[in-house]
Image (spheres, rainbow, N blue to C red):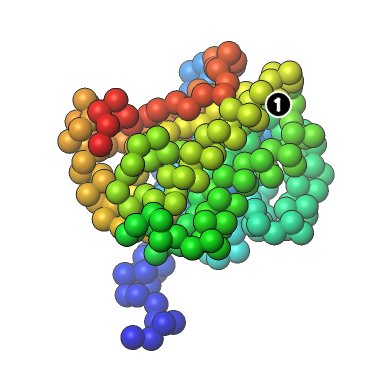
Amino acid sequence: MGGNKIPLKFRLYMMLYPLRILMKSLASNFTGGEKMGNFNLEGKKAIVFGVANDASIGWHIAKKLNDSGVRIALGYQERAEQLVKPLLSMLNNPFAEKCDVVDDVLLTEFFNKVEKEFGKVDFLIHSIAFAKKEHLQGKYYEVDRRGYQVAQEVSAYSLAELTRRTAPLMNDNGSIIAMTYYGSEKVTPNYNIMGVAKAALESSVRYIANDLGGKGIRVNAISAGPIKTLAASGISDFDTMLNHSREKAPLKRNIDADDVANLALFLCSDMSKNITGQVIYVDAGYSIMGI
């Protein structure tokens, strides 16, 4: 079993990806230019981390903000470049640069370029999480020290890191949004170390909200129900999570990335000016049912 052999499913995905993006780009030409009612954010600027492909929650948020008049700066990992670059045609004059939240040199270069290109920014979207696949199954207590450190650094500490670098560039009354999940509060099978990291992320949201409240900068987390993304594919038996969520939700359905993007748009708008330090759910009611 060759370790470097690329699975057929992934090769087919990569072959069809350009066509898929072209079709989306053509469709956006007919719908993307319309501003969404009271959510016209014309002239605003956002930094978005966490776009890996067109299924990413970060991408759906970036596109929704773009369509509401926001200029987007994307920080993406080098390994995702082939999947991110084709998406840029669907954004209005974006800035995009390779960056990694665990690399101080790349972070400094990225934010220096954002400051030069944008001057000031209004929003920061943190849609980043990572844990080794073997730690998203089995027993939580079997996670090794390094695996714990990596999950916490990428999934939780990075919010503080990005905030520290963004805050000097952020206009008053800005908005910072992070992505979390109900597994931070209740035991969710196979979520394991990620649940612990998300709990740390949510606590960070509250402390950072207090730190930045004097500037009117709001800091919140969106707790989304399970959604099929590249990151979710690493969670063992994820389809069972989807089915369970749909069955237990009062609305009897799963959500999608656009539902999350709609909430992010609200949290970036002045309509949410008095909401900060909160974890806000968009999950068809799953959170009130438990597991």
Reply above or below: 97 against 11. above
Residue 123 spot, x, y in % from top left:
64, 32
In the picture as drawn, the residue positioned furthest to the front comes out as 141
Q: Amino acid at mark 1?
A: Asp
**Quadrant where the image shows the C terminus:** top left
Q: Which SS class for mark 1?
A: helix
Residue 83 spot, x, y in % from top left:
50, 60
In this orientation, which residue lies closer to the viewer: 2 or 54? 2
Q: How dense is the environment of label 1, judged by Cα within 10 Å: few (below 14), some, or many (20 and up)?
A: few
Reply above or below: 160 against 50. above
* Residue located 63% across and 36% down the image: 124
Q: Can the viewer see residue 108?
A: yes
Q: Can the viewer see residue 83?
A: no
Residue 107 spot, x, y in % from top left:
72, 53
Residue where numbered disc 1 is placed: 211
**Quadrant where the image shows the N terminus:** bottom left
* Residue located 59% across and 15% down the image: 273
